[in-house]
Amino acid sequence: MAAEPMALLGLAKTSLREQTLTALRQAITTGQLAPGKHLVETELSEMLNISRGTLREALRQLQQEGLVAPGPRGRLAVRSLDVKEIRDIFAVRAALEILAAQTLCRLDDRSEAVAQLRSALKIMDQEVKHSIERGIEADLDFHRVLCRLTNNESLLHAWEQLEGSIRMSIMWAGKERGVKNMSVSRHAEIVDAIDSADVALAATVISAHMDTAAEVLVTS
């Protein structure tokens, strides 16, 4: 079976294992390796020009991240999401981002955090107009910044562990539906709640934001 090569980027900067992870994550979340696709070690190791040992290490990490899962015969395959799983992913995401927003609300000086979030919104507004793919990246970056600004490494790590599943949710629904969730005004409501230091409002806004986002993705 002919297979398109997956590029390994920046080998001088990171380990081969990390680059293998990057290549496989990208292939999965862009659909190059489609949901349900069985992962054959010999094919992948040849495509990536790596040893099967390195590949297995990367696949174990991807299994922990929920991007791949064992099938009925124990063979690993790209995870295929269903409606319940997407709703569950966004429920967990809501809990994390509510904690992030409420943490920022409680800062004595929120001005720098608010400025960075508004800057991320401006970038999103520009990128959505450029292309769906760049809009998706800018949307995710806004939410990543929200978590990073808390200086809570455990929170940020937990959110980043969900990132692959979030991307897969968008892929499952289709990019056209995914772009409907990139309303800058809806994201601005989150920043406004933080700017006003309204802890309850921040929780309400993010909960509604994630509920709506999940419904957009799962509703035909």
Image (cartoon, rainbow, N blue to C red):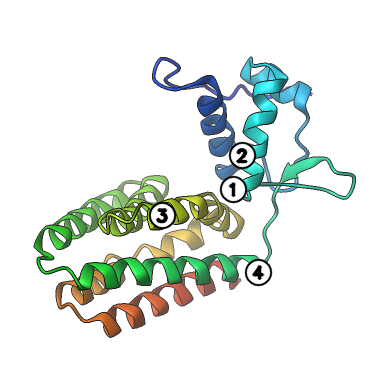
Q: Residue at x 59, y 66 (%)?
A: 86
- Dots 2 and 1: beta carbons under 8 Å? yes
Inspect the image, locate mark 3, and give the three-letter code of the amino acid beneath it: Ser
Q: Is residue 94 in view from this perspective?
A: yes
Question: Which is in the foreground here, disc 3 or disc 4?
Answer: 3
Q: Residue at x 59, y 69 (%)?
A: 88
Q: Which residue is mark 4?
A: 83
Question: SS class of the residue under badge 1?
Answer: loop
Q: Position of residue 168 (x, y in %)?
A: 57, 52
Question: SS class of the residue under badge 2?
Answer: helix
User: Is residue 152 left or right of 90 when viewed as pictured?
Assistant: left
Q: Which residue is mark 3?
A: 154
Give the mark nearest the N terminus, 3 or 4: 4
Q: Which residue is mark 1?
A: 65
Question: SS class of the residue under badge 3?
Answer: helix
Q: Which mark is residue 17?
A: none
Inspect the image, locate mark 1, and give the three-letter code of the amino acid beneath it: Glu
Mark pair 3, 4: CA separation: 28 Å
Inspect the image, locate mark 2, and give the three-letter code of the amino acid beneath it: Gln
Q: Position of residue 169 (x, y in %)?
A: 56, 58
Q: Position of residue 43 (x, y in %)?
A: 75, 23
Mark pair 3, 1: CA separation: 15 Å
Which residue of the protein is positioned furthest toward the right in this rendering? Answer: 73
Mark pair 4, 2: CA separation: 24 Å
Inspect the image, locate mark 4, and give the three-letter code of the amino acid beneath it: Val
Q: Quadrant of residue 183?
A: bottom left
